[in-house]
Image: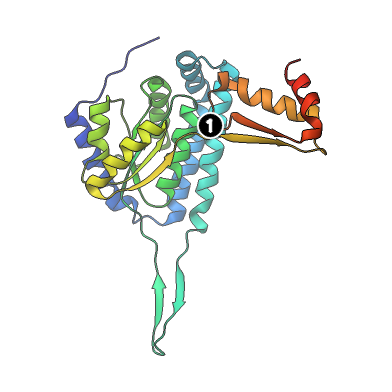
Amino acid sequence: IGHVSAASPAQVKAACECAALAQRQWRKLPAIERGNHLRALADALIERKDAIGKALARESGKSLEDATNEVVYAADITRYHAEWARRIEGEVIPSDGARENLVLHREPVGVVACLIPFNYPVYTLLRKIAPALITGNTVVVRPSNNTPCSAFEIAQAVLDAGLPPGVVNIMAMDHDAAEQMCTHPRVAMITLTGSVAAGRRMLEFSKVNIARVSLEMGGKTPAIITPSADLDAAIAAIVGSKTTHCGQLCTAVERVYVHRSLHDEVLQLLYT
């Protein structure tokens, strides 16, 4: 459906350094002002939801309706994190000394490297960058090489929203460039949604700078059916979780635990 340019090693290095430079000012903004920027970004996503949804549908195989709805959900979670502007708090801790109190003040980590999966690439991208931004960090984003076009439409929304230059950097890149991003001296945190193998690589990359990591590597979601369950609803939910987006979602049911008394009935419903 199209071609995109992969960032060169020099461009990846420049993006990380640009993010670090932008973070010096971004962190100084009052949290409520960062929240306003996130609200503007959410509005820009809604303004561009048709363009983002079309790009996502074409590159991922989702229906246009599902793809466009994903943009709406991404805007919703961006607004949710904007509201944390009033909830980022420290602590006053009583001291053992009679003449002092201890104050705990939370500081941003700096630059966050974000690696995005192919299955829900719009929602996950905003789910990663919104909490990073509201807490005073800047981001460098590597979208999945299977779904880069929707990420570049999001980049346009970032521009439309008027976020300061360098706060959000979105670049397609190969595996070598992604390693360079994750091991850049300015990167203080790596967040990945992907495979277990990719998560192991991120742990290795994090050792270079002792960067923090946040890894979501799929799950083994169970469904539990008890004697009091609504069986029709339970079966519909299980089947739906395995067929939505061809089962390519982190919450797809992998195991079903059924009360012994319902075993035969549940099997019959599942296979009919």
Inspect this view and state whether residue 186 appears.
no
* Front residue of this view, candidates 61 and 156: 61
* Front residue of this view, candidates 189 and 78: 189
Tell me the quarter of the picture where residue 203 sits. Answer: top left
Task: Please give the name of the residue rendered at 35% of the width and 21% of the height, measured from the top-left corner.
Answer: 145
Q: Horizontally, is 228 left or right of 132 in the view?
A: right
Q: Residues within 10 Å of mark 1 (few under 14, many from 20)?
A: some
Q: For the N terminus, which image quadrant? A: top left
* Front residue of this view, candidates 81 and 25: 81
Q: Secondary structure at mark 1?
A: loop
Q: Horizontally, is 154 left or right of 17 in the view?
A: right
Residue 175 spot, x, y in % from top left: 27, 27
The residue at the far bottom in this view is 98
Residue 201 spot, x, y in % from top left: 31, 35
Tell me the quarter of the picture where residue 194 sits. Answer: top left
Task: Please give the name of the residue rendered at 39% of the width and 87% of the height, measured from the top-left corner.
Answer: 97
Task: Please give the name of the residue rendered at 39% of the width and 62% of the height, measured from the top-left corner.
Answer: 106
The three-letter amino acid code for the residue at tag 1 is Cys
Eyeballing the image, is 198 above or below 103? above
How many numbered discs?
1
The residue at the far left in this view is 10
Q: For the C terminus, which image quadrant? A: top right
Inspect this view and state whether residue 263 appears.
yes
Residue 47 spot, x, y in % from top left: 51, 28
Q: Horizontally, is 263 left or right of 119 in the view?
A: right
Tell me the quarter of the picture where residue 143 sits. Answer: top left
Name the colour scheme: rainbow
Question: Which residue lies under the disc numbered 1?
Answer: 250
The residue at the far top in this view is 1
Residue 215 spot, x, y in % from top left: 42, 41
Task: Please give the name of the residue rendered at 80% of the width and 36% of the height, measured from the top-left corner.
Answer: 229
